[in-house]
Image (spheres, rainbow, N blue to C red):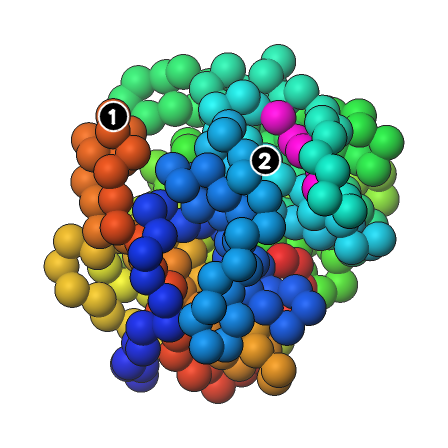
Amino acid sequence: MKTLKPTLLTEGLIFPEAPRWRDGKLWLSDIWGHKVLTVDDQGRKTIVAEIHKRPSGLGFLPDGSLLISTMETAELLRLKNGNLTTVANLRPFAKNGCNDMVVDGKGRAYVDGYNPAQPLPTGSIILVTPDGKATEVAKDLVTPNGCCVTPDGKTFLVNQMGGDEITAFDIQPDGTLANRRVWAKTEGKPDGLCLDAEGAAWVGLFELAKFQRILPGGKVTHEIHFPKGTWTVAPMLGGKDRKTLYMICSITTIEDIVQRGKSKGAVYTARAEVPGAGWP
């Protein structure tokens, strides 16, 4: 196993989430900062939108407009030409709100939905088609989080944060999901997720203060360690050659972030050997 060293790119965020690479910039949401913003290769931040609904998941439609899922109101929003509109109300499927999502090459959004349960919320995947129709396409997941679609558009992967597992589904022609299976068991609770061109997944194990590169079946090839107490939230491969691994991290606790929105967030980078692939 190889160990890579992280380098700080930018800080001054509260609780960043959902890193995406688009148009030569890193895009991300700051859930408790109530913003969507971009970060350039010098670490300079630009606010794209202020959204007082706890924005989380991000994804781009084929026309370049931005979709945003909200934790507080369980909505899917669309930002186009500076105008913010509601695409779908997902509360019927997500009583406790929404978290991350991925938008595939056909403009279909797959959104995490949460519902009350103990000790962890149960979850589902909600498919929102380009016409705004919402359908539950997977359920009985334990705190679903980071998700992605393979480059061929045929497989959907999602982290079950409460199940220590990356779960795979086949994507049917109509966008629904079938053939649920274990893609890999993880060492800890997997948060964010992205893919590379060799079919491996970079995963943030938020309670273990590290990111791992994991092959199908669970073999770990690379690790990136952070100081104890760091939440290693989400990775994204970007840069001109898609070999810059962006890593979203925060210093916080469950109590602080849930009850008070208290956190210190930052973005780090490392150089990967294999470029990014698929969506996001």
Sequence-earlier tag: 2 or 1:
2
What residue is at 42 percent from the left and 33 percent from the top?
143
77 displayed left or right of 147:
right
Q: The C terminus appears in which quarter of the rendering? A: bottom right
Image location of residue 34, percent across then percent down: 46, 38
Q: Tell me, yes or no, whether the highlighted magenta stretch contains residue 240.
A: no
Task: Report whether residue 145 is seen.
Answer: no
Which residue is the site of mark 2? 69
Task: Report whether residue 65 is seen.
Answer: yes
What residue is at 59 percent from the left and 44 percent from the top?
49
Give, as a three-letter code, the residue at label 1: Gln
Image location of residue 166, percent across then percent down: 46, 50
Q: Main secondary structure of the magenta part?
A: strand
Give, as a three-letter code, the residue at label 2: Ser
52 displayed left or right of 67:
left
Give the vertical position of 48 relative to 223 (above or below): above
What residue is at 46 percent from the left and 19 percent from the top?
96
What's the mark number on residue 259?
A: 1
Give the vertical position of 111 relative to 280 (above or below): above
- Whether label 2 touches label 1, CB < 8 Å: no
213 displayed left or right of 258:
right
Residues 238 and 168: in front is 238
Image: magenta residue range: 75-79
Quadrant of the rendered structure where residue 196 is?
bottom right
Within 10 angstroms of label 1, few (less than 14), some, or many (20 or more) residues?
A: few
Image location of residue 186, percent across then percent down: 35, 55
Image location of residue 4, percent across then percent down: 31, 81
Residues 103 and 188: in front is 103
Give the vertical position of 210 relative to 186 (above or below): below
